[in-house]
Amino acid sequence: MPVNRKFKRIAILTGGGDCPGLNAVIRGVAKPAHDHGLSVLGITDGFEGFVEGKAQELYNRDVSGILATGGTILGSSNKGDPFHWPTRIGDEIQIMDRSKDVLRNYEGWNIDCVIAIGGDGTMHISKKLAEMGINIVGVPKTIDNDLEATDQTFGHDSAVWVVSEALDRLHTTASSHHRVIAVEVMGRYAGWIALNGGLAGGADIILLPEIPFDWEAVYDRVVERNMMGKRFSLVCVAEGAKPIGGEMVIKEKDIKRTDPIQLGGIGEIVSKRIQQSTGLECRYVVLGHLQRGGSPTPFDRILSTKFGTHAIDMAMNKEFGKMVALKGMNIDSVNIEDAISKQKLVTPDHQAVQAARAVGVKFGTWDL
């Protein structure tokens, strides 16, 4: 942006998977931006729209009444990485770099700053675009809560609420029918949803990617509960959970995505193995995209609004190449590269793990 040019136009995009709170951020950005006299451009379908030149003007009427609405009014895509763009040539899909198309649209739309709302993938793309000269501010979104440099991402609390609610409901049916029920939850390589959702929902066993489990320890726990007269058990299983010496269960691979691996299926395996080895009746439930849908929790509505309003302040102050972050009770800014330097994973000594162990939750290990 030329030094003497007046700051007057921002753009917003929502990248990666959808989650509750995206619309609250859009509202949190757009309303104060309009108050500053800025025009707001909504890029549709994430970076896919940035590459293909798809966008719409956002006015106050467009962002009114969307605080509690799930999803995103702009649309999203987890297959729109401009540096990893799938293109059909003949009978084959080839990966191409279309980042120059992004730069062309950025300049053609006369954008002064892009507010990029997304998770790990979005922040990696944002860093690369910043290195190309695009002014960008990141807002951390992921139900997985696996972004470094922020205490929490918006969307996570809403996903945890869904898991907790599901476990509450499954508790009654598992108890009535004296069954073991395994509940598979999202999170990819991080176990935050399973840990926090399982703890909030009273799971008896929580299986995490970060703590490989022993099959015998899992069997022993459900049999022990049954012998004690507790004739049911709830097992909260992260989709990336794996046994000691084993691998994560891959549902399928899609080369159109930057990370082609799609996890899924461990919940069914856990359920069948428990039934075969213990003789106890088992069922499994895969919550899947239920964790992404619906209205955000009050916590996520507040956090999203704070993130959005802080992002526009950062843009106005030309804090480009940075990401909004929650630090304790305060909203701050961090370098995007710090947010993606490593994945934030559950540690075995995390306070939530310790609290769970203290109230009798097992993690599929022989630890006390």
Image (spheres, grey):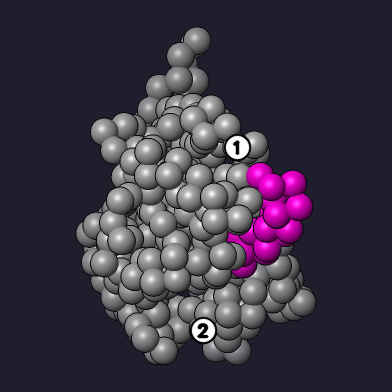
Q: In the picture, which quadrant includes the C terminus?
A: bottom left
Is label 1 in a helix, a strand or a loop? loop
- 44 relative to 15 in the view: left or right: right
Write the residue at 38% across / 37% down.
215
Q: Are marks 2 and 1 in contact (CB under 8 Å)?
A: no
Between 353 and 342, which is closer to the camera in this rendering? 353
The residue that label 1 is drawn on is 280
Q: Earlier in the sequence, mark 2 or mark 1?
A: 1
Residue at left offset 24%, top offset 57% = 342
Q: Which residue is mark 2?
A: 306
Q: What is the magenta range?
A: 161-179
Disc 1 residue type?
Answer: Leu
- Residue found at x 48% / y 50%: 224
SS under mark 2:
helix
Q: Is residue 215 above or below residue 12?
A: above
The image position of residue 305, as x and y in percent, is 57, 81
Against 251, is 166 above or below?
A: below
Closer-to-camera residue (362/142): 362
Q: Which mark is residue 153?
A: none
Q: Nearer the viewer, residue 163 or 244?
A: 244
Classify mark 1: residues with Cα within 10 Å, few (<14), some (14-19) or many (20+). some
- Asked whether, in this view, residue 115 is left or right of residue 23, the answer is left
The magenta stretch spans residue 165: yes
Answer whether residue 146 is magenta in the image.
no
**Mark 2 residue type:** Lys
Residue 230 % position (x, y): 60, 56
Let me know if residue 154 appears in the view. Answer: yes
Q: Position of residue 276 (x, y in %)?
A: 53, 27
Q: Separation of disc 2 and disc 1 at Cα?
A: 48 Å
Q: Is residue 293 visible?
A: no
For label 2, count other residues whose C-alpha is less than 10 Å away and answer few (under 14), some (14-19) or many (20+): many
